[in-house]
Amino acid sequence: PQVLLKIWIKEFLKTVAELKPKFLALHCQEIGGKNYEESMIHVEDFVSTLLESEELQDFTHVKIFLDEDFTSLEKFTALGCLYFIHNSLNNVKLWDFEKQIFVSALGKEIFSGNIELVTTKEKVKFPQDFFPECKWSRKGFIRTRWKLANTVFDLVNIHLFHDASNFLSIESFPSPYTKIRQHALKYTLDKFSEDNYDKYPFFIFGDFNFRLDTGAVIKKLTNNSSPFHIKSAKNGEIEKMVYNDTDSSLLLTLGKKEFDLINQDEIFCGSQNFKWLLEYDKELETFKERLFEFEINFPPSYPFTEDSKSSTYMKTRCPAWCDRVLLSKSAKGFIKTEENDSVVIYRTVGTTVPMGDHKPVLLWFHLDASSGNLMPFQILSSVNEQSCECLLDNDDNNEPHVRLRTHSIPVFRRFPSNHSKARRTISDIPSTQKPPIHKEDWYTKTQELFEKLRSKYSDTKSSRHLSHHSSSSEEWYSSLKSSNGKSNDTNSSTSAPKVLMSQLSETRSVVTVIEVQSNNNEESSLNDRKSVACDNNRVATDGEESNNTSSSTSISIPAPVVCEGIMKESTETVLHSSDISTRYIYVQYGDSPVTVFRETTV
């Protein structure tokens, strides 16, 4: 630790300084090392060195989870999760798995020792019967859930089972060890998809202990030559398998924990190009429909010598890509990529210097928040959350339905309360009628979304558009003429909609979030408008007459139909005119109603 750990930290911090991340997730396995009872004391020094480093001083928010209690054999995983949040990120939240709410991730917290009662993480140790050959193991995973840039995702630190014997590994593929790893990984993924928590995209990274099809690799290296067996004089068991080339020169010596190949480093990471080995990297193929990995352009990450003076492969196992960063197929949408993936970096850290038996592997990317899995109550990042009001929380703090309207102009025509098109506001709905989430009722009939979302807009003077209204908005809104020519006084049985004010930028931006209520009494004429037309002065639906008296800043924009059926993820449509730029984003979260986000810049 006195030498190798210093080299590791130096190389790690150099990488941080080079890439300048804003959110840094570091997953460690086997904290405390193989001799954890003696070496666990070094973990505190490791963490302190990172926190005091110059490279991490701008990461003012820190969350660290260290499972160090090796006395709890049935729970101990030796996993460490270290998360560093840059001071430029001020609205990062962490999920509390017990309370099932997001809590602030600001400040510094270190959870170490026995962390069983820490509720902002989920920790699972794999059942012992997963690996019956081993009397005791530390294998398992830790999951945390994050809300960053209005995007929710899980980060999973995982450690899977190793190969105990090279002899058993080469007998077949998949080997018994491969099957154990695949079983444990399937167990993990199934748990995420079947538990009672909401489902979100995830990144799962750590030591998967994936191995190559070692038997096939040996056949390739030795040209299918047959080995010479060296057996034990005591019990006759094979101790070594020796492979020679055609002129009887030694090529490979294989033992239970020995893999001694001539010119090993040249073959696996030298000029002969390691990519020929990718053909034998097969363990992940079983999960190709569930997991994604960026292209591997680095040599196998394991096993390297733990000598502090060199960085060569150890002669114990066939080199393999044990350490990986994988992601769910849905998480791939979070990552900004170009055609050549040039904005994504997937490589090892400390390629040419000693870093221990495993080379750390990193994935660096830009988070595309606009493609995130937004929850129903989340809005575009440009909107100040404090300007939004919760109009309906369904008496359930865990999964609130929030309908937000943030605008500076009146956009809905007011109908008498007895009219078939009268809009029902939240104040009109008794609490006993507030619909629960994921129920098929008038509120959540998303199948009818695009046929029912049609609104008439009142003509509004230009001065209304260009002025900023405050909480008095409801007063002037209620004075507008309704369709029967009578003014809407504040005592009407149909309350005026809540109008929330937000000055978003120097250019006037209007953000409207609408969650649709289906109404079987709506007239069919509202269903006839299928598309959106744009001109220089306004945006209107087919079948709605343009108002020639409207100024260039007046807006009349019903939500357009962009696809058929129920949306399964966010879809974006952008409409442009000379004075108006409008963006619609359709989001469906689970079985909840489709939410339409409209951002209009005038």
Image (tube, rainbow, N blue to C red):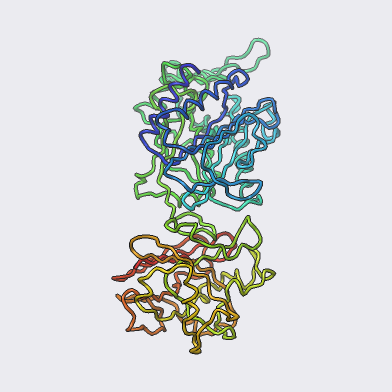
| Quadrant assignment for the C terminus | bottom left
Tell me the quarter of the picture where residue 561 sits: bottom left
Q: In this view, does 446 lie to the left or right of 539?
A: right
Percent position of residue 368, x then y: 42, 51
- Quick one: 147 or 307, which is closer to the camera? 147
Percent position of residue 538, x then y: 34, 76
Number of marks in the image? Answer: 0
Q: Which residue is drawn at 50% across and 18% down?
A: 1
Percent position of residue 313, x then y: 45, 22
Residue with the most extreme top position: 233
- Quick one: 196 or 429, which is closer to the camera? 429
Q: In this view, does 423 lie above or below 260?
A: below
- Quick one: 93 or 368, which is closer to the camera? 93
Percent position of residue 345, x then y: 39, 40
Q: Can residue 288 be seen here?
A: no
Residue with the most extreme bottom position: 484
Q: Which residue is drawn at 36% across and 69% down?
A: 575
Q: Can residue 571 be seen here?
A: yes
